[in-house]
Amino acid sequence: MRIAISENMAERIPRDLALVILLTLACIPFVLISPLNETPVRIILGLLLVLFLPGYSLIAALFPAKDDLDGIERIAPELRA
């Protein structure tokens, strides 16, 4: 079974949202696999997944253009909890 990914997929998915997807997928083994779910990496990835990534994803979806917000303006709403 071979999955074909179009060459312009990298152009359609912004890098910051690709990083969010990657971190979400990286969290899955640390939750489900028994030896890994006892490590402190699970706590770090879990806190990042629960506290930071949802807000950042929302801001990135609402303001997709790079010129809409600066880097600190994208990160600041997630940090003021």
Image: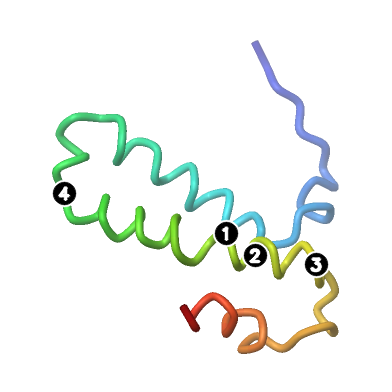
Q: Amino acid at mark 2?
A: Asp
| SS assignment at label 4 | loop
| SS assignment at label 2 | helix
| C-alpha distance separating marks 3 and 1 | 12 Å
Please report the residue visible at 30 percent of the width from the left and 30 percent of the height from the top: 32
Q: Amino acid at mark 3?
A: Leu
| C-alpha distance separating marks 2 and 3 | 13 Å
Discs 4/3, front: 3
Residue bearing the label numbered 1: 54
Residue 49 as seen in the image, left or right of residue 43: right
User: Residue 56's spot in the image, x, y percent?
Assistant: 61, 67
| C-alpha distance separating marks 4 and 2 | 26 Å
Residue bearing the label numbered 4: 39
Discs 2/3, front: 3
Above or below, comparing residue 38 to residue 79 in the picture? above
| C-alpha distance separating marks 4 and 3 | 35 Å
Residues tagged 2 and 3 counted as in contact (Cβ below 8 A)? no
User: Residue 81's spot in the image, x, y percent?
Assistant: 46, 78
Q: Amino acid at mark 1?
A: Pro
Residues tagged 4 and 2 counted as in contact (Cβ below 8 A)? no
Which of the marked residues, 2 or 1, is nearer the chain's N terminus?
A: 2
The image's mark for residue 16 is 2
| C-alpha distance separating marks 1 and 4 | 23 Å
Discs 1/4, front: 1
Q: Amino acid at mark 4?
A: Thr
User: Residue 75's spot in the image, x, y percent?
Assistant: 58, 80
| SS assignment at label 1 | helix
Which of the marked residues, 4 or 2, is nearer the chain's N terminus?
A: 2
Please report the residue visible at 80 percent of the width from the left and 67 percent of the height from the top: 62
Residue bearing the label numbered 3: 62
